[in-house]
Image (cartoon, rainbow, N blue to C red):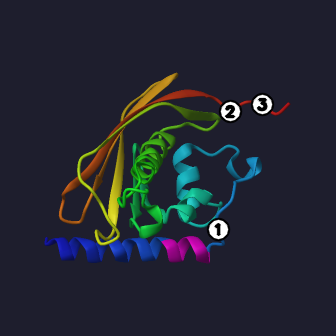
Amino acid sequence: MTAEDTLALWNEQRDSVVTRMLAGGGKPGLARPEMVAGKTGLEIMQAMLAGEIPFPHIADTLDFSLVEVAAGKAVFQGTPQLKHYNPLGSVHGGWYATLLDSALGCAVHTMMPAGRVYTTAELSVNIVRAASHKTGPLRAIGTVIHCGRQLATAEARIVGPDGKLYAHATTTCLVFEVPKPA
């Protein structure tokens, strides 16, 4: 498959997901506790893709979207834009880091049983290729390496439709029970 074919598939998938999310009533926001109660992490992520619960505001802010989830995997698609540039005239490292952290965290989230959550304890990012507003869509693909009762680790890569690597990252997450309301 050519890079152009891959890009066409990526854009078709993203458009389909965004349309489905919006048609289901999805919008940026925070899910209320009753919206996620009793759901596994994977069920929560699937509900977000279906537009049944809000998606995080950061997706709007940095122009990226969750496009795919499975047990131990999360895929985001984003397009760097001029508004994501730093004063040096290149895409800010925070854009890469946020896209990677989202893929990593959501991959871990898919492994959480009902009543368990996680938080990022460590994030390590390596940017290996510059992206620009001319790059076009990129994908961050997060995969869980290990998920235990107290710790989870994952890795993610940002790639172009041609398979070129732009950045990669690892994370360690703390896993714990959902705190009881006070």
Residue 62 or residue 5, whichever sits in front: 62
At 67% from the left and 43% from the top, the residue drawn is 38
Report the amino acid beneath label 1. Lys
Q: Quadrant of residue 160?
A: bottom left
Identify the image quadrant of the N terminus.
bottom left
Instruction: Say which residue label 3 marks.
Output: 180
Q: Residues within 10 Å of mark 3 (few under 14, many from 20)?
A: few
Using the image, tell me which numbered label, if any, was put on residue 178: 2
In this rendering, position of residue 157 left or right of residue 25 = left
Tell me how far mark 2 sits from mark 3, CA to CA. Answer: 6 Å
Nearest-to-viewer mark from 1 and 2: 1
Secondary structure of residue under mark 2: loop
At 56% from the left and 51% from the top, the residue drawn is 43
Report the amino acid beneath label 2. Val
Indicate whether residue 34 is drawn in magenta.
no
At 63% from the left and 46% from the top, the residue drawn is 39
Percent x, y of residue 23: 60, 77
- Boundaries of the magenta span: 18-23
Question: Is there CB contact under 8 Å for labels 2 and 3?
Answer: yes
Tell me how far mark 1 sits from mark 2, CA to CA. Answer: 24 Å
Instruction: Say which residue label 1 marks.
Output: 27
Q: Is residue 40 above or below residue 65?
A: above
Residue 85 or residue 144, whichever sits in front: 85
**Lower position in the chain sequence, tag 1 or tag 2:** 1
Secondary structure of residue under mark 1: loop
In this rendering, position of residue 144 left or right of residue 33 = left
